[in-house]
Image: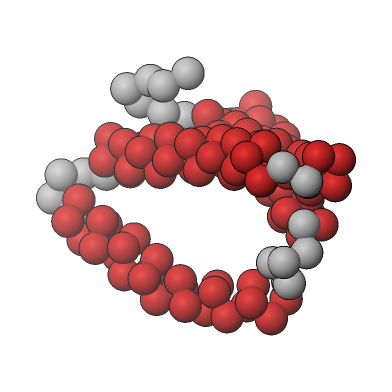
Amino acid sequence: MIKKTPTTNKLLFLIFLDGLALMPSERIYHLSHSIILVAICISLFNFFLSIFNIQFMTFVQVRTDMNYIGRVFGTIFSVAILFMPIGTFFFKFAFNLQNPNNYFVLGSLLTFISIITIILNTIFKSKN
């Protein structure tokens, strides 16, 4: 699954796996009330997210001209640092993270958006 030159669809597939790993945590919690089983779901989510981050940085590094690589990475990290507090405040007010149903909603949204984006990406690539 991990290649030297990742593709857009591979990155989107990793986001899809993120969503799939997060979705069952709500059902597992209601059925077993086991924190360990829920932690496995969250660990899988973090595992796939780590692979996505590594593959994304590789994708950017391979596709960017070496003269601009510092500027591109600087921009990526600056934007990420700027939007982290905004995302934290948004999710703090939009979701009650004590409610396990929110993990199903977030996982479903990740899965749905990645599927739609993979389909659109495939359609646009076939037209070119």
Note whether 85 is above or below 115 in the view shown.
Answer: below
Residue lying at 78% horizontally and 46% vertically, measured from the top left: 33
Residue 44 appears in which quarter of the rendering?
top right
In the picture, the quarter occupied by the C terminus is top right
- Given the current orientation, which residue lies at the most extreme left position? 67
Residue sitting at x 66%, y 46%? 35
Q: Judge by depth and name the residue closer to the eye, 70 or 45.
A: 45
* Left/right of residue 52 with respect to residue 64 in the rendered view: right
Residue 24: image x %, image y %?
76, 39
Residue 16 vs residue 35, the one in the foreground: 35
Scheme of image coloration: secondary structure
Q: Is residue 44 left or right of residue 59?
A: right
The percent coordinates of residue 36 (x first, y second) are: 62, 40
Q: Nearer the viewer, residue 12 or 19?
A: 19
Q: Is residue 109 visible?
A: no
Can you give x and y, in whole percent of width and height, for residue 85 in the image?
A: 47, 78
The residue under the point 38% across, 20% down is 3
Residue lying farthest right?
A: 31
Q: Is residue 25 left or right of residue 90?
A: right
Residue drawn at x 67%, y 37% as measured from the top left: 37
Locate residue 71, reporting x and y percent. 21, 61
Tag count in the figure? 0
Quarter of the image for residue 34 reads top right
Relative vertical location of residue 67 with respect to residue 47 in this rendering, above or below: below
Decide if residue 32 is on the left or right side of residue 58.
right
Residue 5 appears in the rendering: yes
